[in-house]
Amino acid sequence: MSNSNHDRYDYRPITDRSDYDWPDGRRLAIYLGVNYEVFDFGGGLGPKLAPSQTEPDVMNYAWRDYGNRVGAWRLFDLFDRLQLRTTALLNADVLERCPGLAEACRDRGDEIAAHGSSSNAKAQGNMFGLREDSLIADVTEKLATLGIRPSGWLGPWISESQNTPDLLAKNGYRYVLDWAHDDQPTRLSTKYGGLLSVPYSQEINDLPAIIERHQEAETFAAMIRAGVEQLLSECDRRPLVLGIALHPFIMGQAHRVPALARVLTELREADDPRIWWTTAGDIAAHVETNGMAV
């Protein structure tokens, strides 16, 4: 039976909230959320470049695996050149199946955030009680072996059960990226205290834009450019967040990187004093430290 309301947050329009600044008086926080994912061979969920005919689905499996073998490293080169620290959204199984990839994210200074165990595991929304609690705890402990316990969570397929926010708070998570309902961090109610929802875009996100809507890299880059332009026009009235979601098997393809590189280079070289280039975790920490967010 469906619920008419979730009781996680109350309605409050963005025009009726307290004003505050990001560090150094900046007004628009931008972060890159980069999804590092593994998929099972011969079954399970997974984005598709084209319809599969049989299992094992070699074509779509190999296309997705390209991101870990090639695309991620191509994006590292771009991020290094632009001196961009990102939020690395890691499947815990990356540690075993792609040795060195998670470590490369850590070593370049990226924030390590949790993205479930794998991206075609059973949808988290179908899990109940102890099973989901155990999954979250296991993913957390595996990623903590990189040297720091993750404080942020993005569910594979943005799938949640009725209990997910409670269980994330219970397991020590500070923020979640599943709820794309606002341009500011908001507080979610849980049984174990507050949990921040940090904006993560389902629009400026290469997977739905390119795979589902059949757009291409230049259009996606134009979306980034237009989104930043609009948010900058509003940020004198309110602090805002833009999360740009990337997948190495999509945006890390050779023919797509140049468009992404052009728009990010333009934005970095403009050096707009209103923009704070940051991570999702630093956004959450700033809000927590200063007692902000509705």
Image (tube, rainbow, N blue to C red):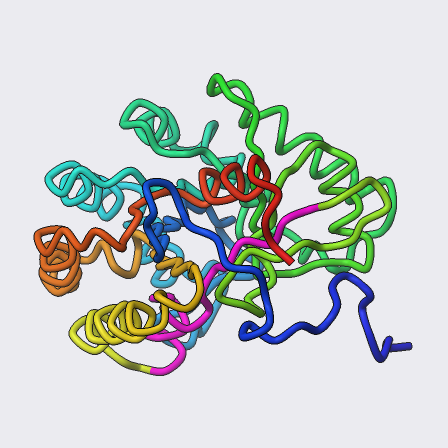
x, y (%) of residue 114? 54, 39
Residue drawn at x 29%, y 38% is 85
Residue 117 in sight from this viewpoint = no
Nearest the eye: 264 or 210: 264
Relative height, residue 204 to residue 112 (above, below): below
x, y (%) of residue 288? 59, 39
Nearest the eye: 292 or 3: 292
- Residue 210: say if magenta: yes
Magenta span of residues: 195-213
143 sits to left or right of 230 = right
203 sits to left or right of 71 = right
Nearest the eye: 187 or 107: 187
Quarter occupied by the N terminus: bottom right
Q: Which corner quadrant of the image does residue 246 belong to?
A: bottom left
Relative height, residue 9 to residue 79 (above, below): below
Q: Which corner quadrant of the image does residue 76 belong to?
A: top left
x, y (%) of residue 79? 19, 42
- Residue 90: say if magenta: no
Relative height, residue 24 to residue 19 (above, below): above
x, y (%) of residue 126? 77, 59
Nearest the eye: 41 or 240: 240
Residue drawn at x 62%, y 33% is 139
In this view, the residue farthest toward the right is: 1
Residue drawn at x 52%, y 37% is 285
Quarter occupied by the C terminus: bottom right
Residue drawn at x 85%, y 51% is 128
**How many marks are shown on the rendered structure?**
0
Residue 173 in sight from this viewpoint = yes
195 sits to left or right of 176 = right
